[in-house]
Image: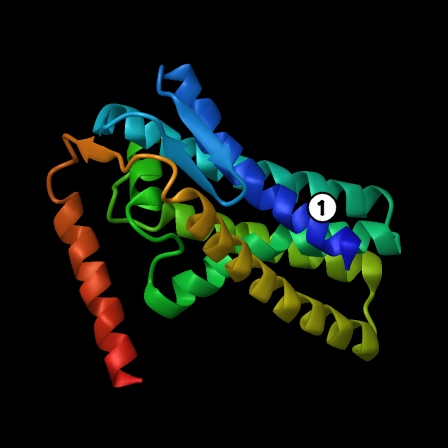
């Protein structure tokens, strides 16, 4: 569990470091905390916000690729635990995409797509993580050749990991939200706010239906 939890927390933090690194390159002061990045200014222009969003995507992509390569090179129990921990956020993004139609809340994926000159209303970032999850699962299946008992162990571990992931985010917000300022993004791409509004409305409608 320690080998699983450590890479999980490190992978989430790498996502925030990706945001922060992109901000630092663009002259934006940020502090990456374990599960959230905080911008140390009252406003952030959209032309810089898109690169911050892309930095997070890159951070979340690098860790699973490294873990999959490590498992492919040395298919041991410790490599399996590291692989499972790092891939859990990718699975969370994919599950959220299947459940509500967008893998990331707010405008994170849309902004990253704009940085890559892709349509903001599309699902390029969502599909990236779907492909990444499938590829990682294939690597794990080929090299671990899991038995029924090991699959059950992995499922239980993943459920514990999801609880840890949620607790990490909630605890991070409790500790740091009152410490750092709230940043306003200015010059948002026309139509993007309306798109996100429709996504939120759709999510609320689905919850009410359930």
- Closer to the camera, 56 or 16? 16
> Does residue 46 appear left or right of residue 29 in this picture?
left
Q: Position of residue 22 (x, y in %)?
A: 43, 24
- For this orientation, the residue located farthest to the bottom is 210
Residue position marked by numbered label 1 in the rendering:
68
> Does residue 49 appear left or right of residue 38 in this picture?
left
- Closer to the camera, 126 or 50? 50
Who's the residue at 12% across and 51% down the image? 194
Q: Position of residue 46 (x, y in %)?
A: 22, 29
Residue 94 vertical position relative to residue 122 in the rendered view, above or below: below
Residue 101 vertical position relative to residue 180 in the rendered view, above or below: below
Quick check: can you spot residue 62?
yes
Residue 201 vertical position relative to residue 77 in the rendered view, above or below: below
Quick check: can you spot residue 139?
no
Q: Secondary structure at mark 1?
A: helix
- Closer to the camera, 100 or 136? 100
Sort mark 1 into few (<14), some (14-19) or many (20+) by Cα contacts within 10 Å.
many
Who's the residue at 46% across and 57% down the image? 170
């Amino acid at each position: 569990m320690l080998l699983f939890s450590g890479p999980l927390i490190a992978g989430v933090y790498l996502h925030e470091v990706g945001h922060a690194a992109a901000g630092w390159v663009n002259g934006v002061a940020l502090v990456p905390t374990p599960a959230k990045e905080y911008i140390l200014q009252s406003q952030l222009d959209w032309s810089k916000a898109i690169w911050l969003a892309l930095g997070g995507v890159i951070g979340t992509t690098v860790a699973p690729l490294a873990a999959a390569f490590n498992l492919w090179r040395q298919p041991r129990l410790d490599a399996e635990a590291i692989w499972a921990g790092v891939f859990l956020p990718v699975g969370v993004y994919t599950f959220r995409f299947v459940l509500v139609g967008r893998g990331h809340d707010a405008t994170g994926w849309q902004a990253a797509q704009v940085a890559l000159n892709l349509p903001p209303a599309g699902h390029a970032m969502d599909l990236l993580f779907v492909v990444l999850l499938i590829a990682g699962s294939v690597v794990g299946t080929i090299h671990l050749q899991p038995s029924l008992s090991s699959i059950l162990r992995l499922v239980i571990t993943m459920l514990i990991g999801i609880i840890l992931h949620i607790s990490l985010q909630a605890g991070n917000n409790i500790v740091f939200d009152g410490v750092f300022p709230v940043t306003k993004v200015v010059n948002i791409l026309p139509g993007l706010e309306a798109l996100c509004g429709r996504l939120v409305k759709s999510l609320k409608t689905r919850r009410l239906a359930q």
